[in-house]
Image (cartoon, rainbow, N blue to C red):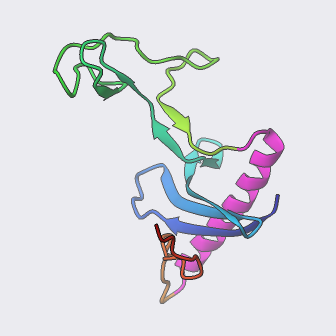
Amino acid sequence: MKISEVRVKLVNNKDDRLKAFCSITIDGEFVVRDIKVIEGSNGHFVAMPSRKMSDHCDKCGGKNHLRAKFCNNCGSALHENRARKDFKGRIKMHADIAHPINAECRKRIQSKVIAAFNEEMEKSKQPGYKPVELDEPDDDVPEIVS
């Protein structure tokens, strides 16, 4: 696997731990978006794209996020401690959408993304800096006609 491109969009909020959103292109063929650069106590690290976990109301079947105390659909009280816990006993609130399978792959991704983040931080200090646009339309992708 070769990471052929990394795009970094810096986040302006100085008080937040979230520092950037990134996308990586793998082998010039596959894109993973919504990778985050987070400022941790031991430096910056990469968080893979994820979605909030949810469950369903026992009474009506309505979908609710795990911190909800009442059903969004019928209003009935939801059971506490509905969330599954990880191997460390912590509540699992998010599930990865895409993630590396092993530590070596995670290290390669993190290394490339953090290096690109640092480059973008340096560029942002230059006069006339223009932020990267992550969601540019793909002009070379053929339109699918049904």
In the rendered image, the vertical position of residue 122 relative to residue 30, given as above or below: below
- Using residue 70 as the reference point, say whether residue 45 is left or right of it: right
In the rendered image, the vertical position of residue 137 relative to residue 107, given as above or below: below
Which quarter of the image is occupied by the N terminus? bottom right
Q: Residue at x 40, y 12 (%)?
A: 81
In the rendered image, the vertical position of residue 66 relative to residue 126, given as above or below: above
Q: Residue at x 52, y 59 (%)?
A: 21
- Residue 114: name its quadrant: bottom right
Percent position (x, y) of residue 92? 51, 25
**Residue reaching furthest to the front:** 146
Percent position (x, y) of residue 24? 65, 63
In the rendered image, the vertical position of residue 54 relative to residue 29, given as above or below: above
Decide whether residue 50 is among the magenta residues.
no
- Using residue 142 as the reference point, say whether residue 119 is left or right of it: right
Percent position (x, y) of residue 16? 42, 51
What residue span does the magenta drawing correspond to?
Answer: 100-126
Q: Residue at x 52, y 42 (%)?
A: 50
Percent position (x, y) of residue 18? 48, 52
Closer to the camera, 44 or 61?
61
Decide whether residue 124 is among the magenta residues.
yes
- Using residue 105 as the reference point, say whether residue 15 is left or right of it: left
**Residue reaching furthest to the left:** 75
Closer to the camera, 135 or 92?
135
Q: Residue at x 42, y 58 (%)?
A: 14
- Residue 82: name its quadrant: top left
Magenta residues, dominant SS class: helix
